[in-house]
Amino acid sequence: MNIPELSTALANTQLASKVGIAVLDKALENSQTTGESLINMMDRSMELSVNPHIGGNIDMLV
């Protein structure tokens, strides 16, 4: 039984676990942001469907 090798292996396993958790946390944060953006987009599209005249014209000077 080689104690230094076991200690190194355990430290590597713990590091890999922490990195995996950090990546999953970032993915969860990204999913939440994407979901919030989707909800905001749906709210805006519902407003346009209730008020179809909004955004239908462009004022432009040449």
Image: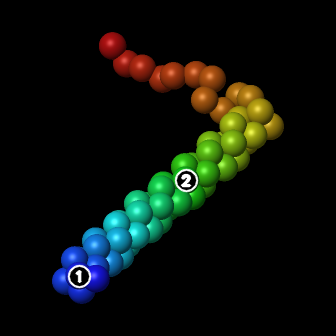
In this rendering, would 14 be left or right of 21?
left
Residue on which disc 2 sits = 31
Q: As drawn, which residue projects farthest toward the front?
A: 1
User: Is tag 2's residue or tag 1's residue first in the polypeptide sequence?
Assistant: 1
Residue on which disc 1 sits = 2
In this rendering, would 39 be left or right of 59?
right
Is residue 47 something that shows in the picture? yes
The alpha-carbon separation of the residues under discs 2 and 1 comes to 43 Å
What secondary structure is found at the residue carrying circle 1?
loop
- Tell me if residue 30 comes above or below residue 11 in the rendering: above
Q: As drawn, which residue projects farthest toward the bottom?
A: 3
Q: Say what amino acid the circle numbered 2 marks.
A: Ser
What secondary structure is found at the residue carrying circle 2?
helix
Question: Measured from the top left, where is residue 35 in percent x and y?
Answer: 61, 51
Q: Say what amino acid the circle numbered 1 marks.
A: Asn
Q: Residues within 10 Å of mark 1 (few under 14, many from 20)?
A: few
In this rendering, would 2 be left or right of 40?
left
- Tell me if residue 37 comes above or below residue 21 in the rendering: above
